[in-house]
Amino acid sequence: MYEYDLIVVGTGPYGRSIAAHATAEGLRLRHLGRRARRAADDRTVTAVRPYGRDGFEVVTEDGESLRTRTVVLALGPAQLTQLPTPASEFRRGEPHRNRFCATHPALFRRLPTVVRLLLSDTDPTSARTDRVTLLSMPVRRRLSRTPDAPPWVDTRFESAHPGLFFAGLLTAAFFGPAIRSAHGAEFTARRVLKGVRRRLGARPR
């Protein structure tokens, strides 16, 4: 019924890292997106829709329909214009909260929403749910209570729609400024693959 375990959409540092981890895990993978030197498939994705009981249909620019159990939307790397400062580059006396935001995304995710907004310099409207136009309107409405807010994700980057994961800029409001540059790609890939394996019903390696 499903041709793939995972389809990754996006060929920036997050998409490439997640695809590499998925390949190492032996998943049936398809990696789609433009402007990458080593992308498996350089076609643009035009739609991602629910399919069957628990899967997705991914449609490419030429009309091909691909069916998969899980999807990762690693969108927005080209839009990253403000990168977090590594902790080693902070000057003595700078606020400790800046180091925390830039180097501890897992702990940052556990903070209450109000505290995260106070600690982070991420503009919550810079990655809005209503800008994820690949997804149908019913799916987008399920991702966030308000269209001008980022889509909600759990600790493994899975959205409110089971099997749909986000990576990169769209998740910075939950994991902090480290996720707005390539700095957070490895952390994100490891977590995403744990979530994908859980969704597939297999134990992570």
Image: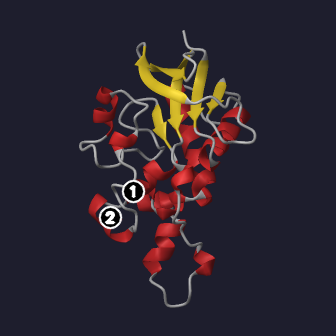
Above/below status of 36 relative to 27? below
Snapshot quadrant of residue 141? top left
Residue at 56% from the left image edge and 51% from the top image edge: 77
- Residue 14: percent from left, percent from top: 60, 47
Q: In this rendering, would 152 be left or right of 62?
A: left
Please identify the residue farthest to the front as the structure is shown: 62
Residue 202 spot, x, y in % from top left: 58, 27
Mark 1–mark 2 distance (CA, rounded to whole Å): 8 Å
Residue drawn at 62 percent across, 46 percent down: 12
Say if 193 sits above or below 182 in the image.
above
Q: Are marks 1 and 2 in contact (CB under 8 Å)?
A: yes
Point out the image quarter for the N terminus: top right
- Total numbered labels: 2
From this view, report whether residue 68 is shown above or below residue 134: above
Q: Which mark is residue 119?
A: none
| Circle nearer the N terminus (1, 2) | 2
Task: Give the residue at mark 1.
Answer: 173
The amino acid type of the residue labelled 2 equals: Leu
Provide the secondary structure element on which disc 1 rests.
helix
Please indicate whether residue 91 sits to the left or right of residue 122 in the image. right
Looking at the picture, tell me which residue is in the foreground, 201 or 42: 42
The image shows residue 127 at horizontal and vertical percentages of 40, 50
Q: Label 2: which residue? A: 117
The single residue placed furthest to the left in the displayed view is 145
Q: Amino acid at mark 1?
A: Ala
The residue nearer to you, when weighing 107 against 36, is: 36
Q: As drawn, is 176 to the left or to the right of 144?
A: right
Label 2 neighbour load within 10 Å: few <14, some 14-19, many 20+ = some
* Residue found at x 53% / y 58%: 80
- Among all residues in the image, which is located at the extreme bottom? 93
